Amino acid sequence: MNVDLPASRDAPSWPSARLLPLGDQHLLVRFSEGLTQSANAAAIEFAQLLNSSEIPGVLETAPNLVSVLLRYDPEAISFMRLSGEIGLRLKTSRAARALNANQHKIPVRFDGPDLNEVAASVELDIAAFITAHNAAPLKALATGFAPGFVYAGFHSEALRVPRRTRVRQQVAAGSVLFAAGQTAIAATDIPTGWHVIGHTEFRNFHPEQDPPSTIRPGDTLVFEAIK
Amino acid sequence: MTRLRIIRAGALATLQDAGRFGYLAHGIGASGPMDRSAFSAAAYMTGGAGPVGIEFTTAGLELEVEDGACTLGLAGGEFSATVNGKAIAWPGACDLATGDRLTITAGPTGNFGYVRFHGNIEMGRVLNSASTNSRIGLGGAQLSAGDALEVRSAAETERGIAPQQVEDGPIRVIWGLHAEQFSPDVRTAFVTEAFEMTSQMDRMGMRLRDPSGVFASAPNLNLVSDAIVDGDIQILGDGTPTVLMRDHQPTGGYPRIATVIGSDQDRLAQLRPGTKVMFSPITVEHAQTLLRRGY
């Protein structure tokens, strides 16, 4: 039932993908089991391709960290037929697509309760940690978990810290979170096991607007320290 | 225009419509009724209903018409309903006038019931939907005593589908995103041992009791956060199986062994705490044939 598709040998091509049924109304195109830059880039680009090359019966497309979720109407198209349509698109060249990425400036007050601990764990003083954190722009990897919640990465290996062992039941919207080589921004109040390193006035969720979030996967995030 | 006043509402009485579809890419799930067929049946009983209805639980619901008149339909599980103290049928319908009071209390079966109106409630509409997402507090409303609702004539009404006989037998599932990461023994036990519904159920999910310890020694997997869909059965770190329902978070990192098929999600939502439940795997093709047949 699962369809394994080998990567074409003609570069540039899509990496191999698995097409998996999630229940009877969703299909997941998964490029990797682990989080890698190449799988993430493929998920973002393939979601854009699907949005520009509509498949009848597909109702909605959403990229995740390493996959693309398609919601479809099984009365209009079966899982097998949809798998065939996706297989055809995975055999097309990947090159022609220009990523229309936007850049977002994220002003951050580095005042989070976990900032000291995080800086110490990567053996930097706070000023040096902030400089290292903001040194290079990050890529928005995915939106998920909660409305407008954005994962951004990747930091260098030297800045990689694990999640906290204890989950905080609620951190406020605007919390800037840090773990697993990534920085994430909470757009609503959420529970989290990530380290809270700062806060931003930037909000990536405006329910009164449509679309309700402005950062799209693939966009560039530039973090700036403010007092 | 008809004005209703909520006299009594349980903690999980919410406004719902078909759902807030189309915003997964923004981290927003669809929500919508826990029992979609009962929501539709309530529209049928109304004789054509506006898109927004009230979902309530075994904690019941009581409302009074303060001004005007309205026709409403009732369905979902088996509840007891009275108008001004006089019993009416369930599922059923009634015409209410100013001063009339509708009282709904739990009956022998079911967790979720619905009131639909021959008219529309224009309240809390966010991103093209009035559905209340209880997890993120978006849209519609969680109703409580004292709330006023205005029912206005609807531009168009939904006919709905007549109440149907609820099927018996195991809850059918399709193997899930992480099924292969469970051992063959665990997978076999999952579809041969009985689980039990618990009182830890809400619009986000329903925790199951696992008396045979099917997942007692399930490994803690370090997974990339990935898409969650309605009906996913996820195994928490302590081995607790949970069926994720309409207000689930859109992505998550706990392993999902299987997904309840679309045709059986409504039935599962109505199983009371203490009810035994068995799971039976079917193919996606079979599940889609059932959906096309309309269950």
Image (cartoon, coloured by chain):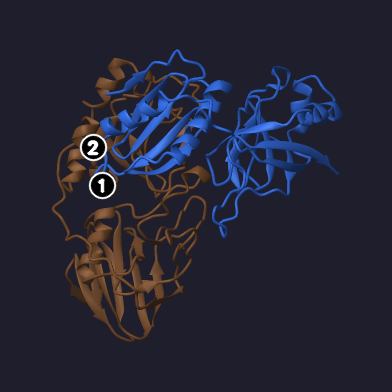
Chain colours: A blue, B brown
Residue B186 versus residue B125: which sits nearer the camera? B125
On screen, residue A47 versus residue B115, left or right, reads right
> What chain letter is assigned to the residue under label 1?
B
Tell me where residue B270 appears, x and y as whole percent.
Answer: 26, 50
Amino acid type assigned to the residue bearing label 2 in the image: Val
Q: What element carries label 2?
A: strand
Tell me where residue B187 appears, x and y as whole percent.
Answer: 29, 21
Name which quarter of the figure residue A38 lies in.
top right
Q: Is residue A50 visible?
A: yes
Image quarter (top left, top right, bottom left or bottom right) of the N terminus of chain B: bottom left
Residue that badge 2 annotates: B277
Tell me where residue B108 appears, x and y as whole percent.
Answer: 20, 56
Q: Is residue A36 visible?
A: no
Q: Is mark 1 on a helix, strand or loop?
A: loop
On screen, residue B94 versus residue A110, left or right, reads left
Residue A121 versus residue B9: which sits nearer the camera? A121
Residue A54 versus residue A17: which sits nearer the camera? A54
Per the rendering, the mark at residue B271 is 1
Name which quarter of the figure residue A195 lies in.
top right
| Cβ atoms at labels 2 and 1 below 8 Å apart | yes
* Residue under the image location 45 percent in, 33 percent down: A68
Q: Are marks 2 and 1 on the same chain?
A: yes
Amino acid type assigned to the residue bearing label 1 in the image: Leu
How would you rate the neighbour count of disc 1 (Cα within 10 Å): few for under 14, some for 14-19, many for 20 or more?
some
Measure the alpha-carbon separation of dots 2 and 1.
9 Å
- B240 above or below B217? below
* Residue under the image location 37 percent in, 60 percent down: B17
* Residue under the image location 26 percent in, 47 percent down: B271
- Looking at marks 2 and 1 on the same chain, the residue that comes earlier in the sequence is marked by 1
Name which quarter of the figure residue A22 lies in.
top left
